[in-house]
Amino acid sequence: MPLPEDAFLKKVAQTEWTNFHGTVTVPIRALWKIRNSSTASTMAGMRETADRLQALIRHAVAQRVRLRAVGSRWSFSEVAAAKDGWALQTDQLNFDFTVGPGSVDPGFTGAPGDLVFAQAGASVAELNRKIEAAPRLRSFRTTGASNGQTLGGALGTGIHGSAIDAAGFEGEVAGLQLLTGTRNLWLEHPDHPTMNAGFAAKLGAELIRDVDLFSAALVSLGALGIVHSAVLRTVPRYRLRSFLRKMPLAQILPALATLDFTGAPLPDPAHRPYFARLVFDPGAKEESGYVTSRYKEACPSDYVTDGALKSGYEAGNDLPGVFSKILQTVPQLRPLVVALAIASELSPFENKLGTPAETYSYTASKPGSAGAAVAFPTAHLVQALTEARAAFKVSPYAPIAFACRFVQPSPALLGFTRFAPTCVMDVDGIDTPATRALMEAVRARFDAAGIVYAQHWGKLHGLTAARLQRSHGDRLARWHHARETLLPDADTRYVFSTDLLTAIGLHR
């Protein structure tokens, strides 16, 4: 079979692939780079690119080579790694569109202007900036707190979310386009019809509304095909008024464990926070932590968002950024300066005002940092922190901190924020053997204590088939059925598999 190369799809000789944070390096057979045939966003261009992607998938099936789409290489884990296969670089596929009234289904209950249609290579930070600008003046209800990942990557692994009363970012997806070698599908939930058959036809896609197929594709792990595009819900543009205060854990933990903030010593006691996060050093002598609270408010129509794509690092969004700075300056002194470093980087502030695009940009973490995340029912917060701190006592020199934030359950079958509501606890720091050992010690203590939890697919993990079964239960059988429905051919399933997926029982 001839190679499916042309001016817009190129095979590049490359024998090694490394992720953005430098935590994963694997051998690969080649790197493929794809771009759209024009710089202007058109449906004809979308069809052309989909055809190229499908041709590449068919070629991978014929050659029996694994194929992994990768965007900004944002995951700490090996979930996107194309070990011994082909890596497909998709970050130039960044078309986005407004949605016209002729494209929505009669059953759609919103307005066309509520929606944005985007290609999967667009970064979440890029989309944030675009939709906040005139004339759209829209915002996403939630994203992550560090938005360098692409839309496809976000739907590949799931992300934390950034709003207490919303699910993760995948919960804002109204429909998505999934490509296999032989099928071009537009998937939606049957209870929430959004786009019509005419829209799907313009994409060259088949419209399917099925609960499990849609829910499986929302966090696909790259195992169901290539996600090419999605329609996302938006809300009127808003701003977040943010505060960071240090306070005793005893004063804030009861509120965080219940998400009932009545009487909590927060900056705006008259309003429920839109976002809350606790960061603390488990090695600190004092029982205190750094609490970020954000409050949603209307954005003036004449407000101009600062659209510069910049790191704009705010400590606590993704703590490896803090520790990577230390790693570059005084790595040998890290165990001695962790408390001072956290205190310095988490300097309290008041009334910091910005739109989501200004508040959440991207974190320029450097190689040498590492992060893990476990999600569990928020009601188990106190017990979970007790177990995590006990694990730290065994590895007191592990250069890490804990950070907790809170979201509602993901609609994805394999979304890791699956609990109602969910606390996500990050274990972030410098990538050392002590750090890796502590991450596993936390998971082991959770196992022994019977705390049900799930792990972030895109961060460092200790996934096993048994742990996955405990995390997701009967959802796994539904996911497998969806995968085998979408990919009935075993050779195609192999192309979209990895060693990790095989080891934990998701490829069979």
Image (cartoon, helix red, strand yellow):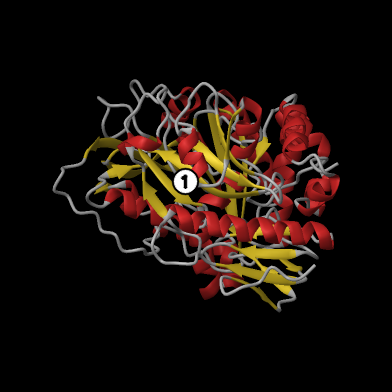
Q: Position of residue 376 (x, y in %)?
A: 61, 31
Q: Position of residue 275 (x, y in %)?
A: 39, 36
Residue at (82% x, 53% y) in the render: 499
Residue at (54% x, 59% y) in the render: 48
Give 133 or 375, whichever is nearer the viewer.
133
Give 26 or 226, whichever is nearer the viewer.
226
Residue at (71% x, 31% y) in the render: 471
Give 133 or 299, whichever is nearer the viewer.
133
Q: Is residue 254 above or below residue 292?
A: above
Instruction: State the quadrant of the N terminus.
Output: bottom right
For mark 1, give the secondary structure: loop
Taking 400 as reference, is 296 left or right?
A: left
Taking 264 as reference, is 464 left or right?
A: right
Number of marks in the image? 1
Q: Position of residue 64 (x, y in %)?
A: 84, 59
Taking 112 as reference, is 465 left or right?
A: right
* Dot 1 crowding, Cα within 10 Å, few <14, some 14–19, many 20+: many
List the residue tagged with mark 1.
144
Looking at the rendered structure, the kind of residue marked 1 is: Gly
Instruction: State the quadrant of the C terminus.
Output: top right
Q: Is residue 445 above or below residue 401?
A: above
Q: Is residue 223 above or below residue 255?
A: below
Q: Position of residue 179 (x, y in %)?
A: 64, 48
Give 413 or 294, whichever is nearer the viewer.
413
Residue at (61% x, 57% y) in the render: 51
Farthest left residue? 302
- Camera sees residue 401: no
- Camera sees residue 87: yes
Quadrant in the rendering for residue 59: bottom right
Farthest bottom residue? 13
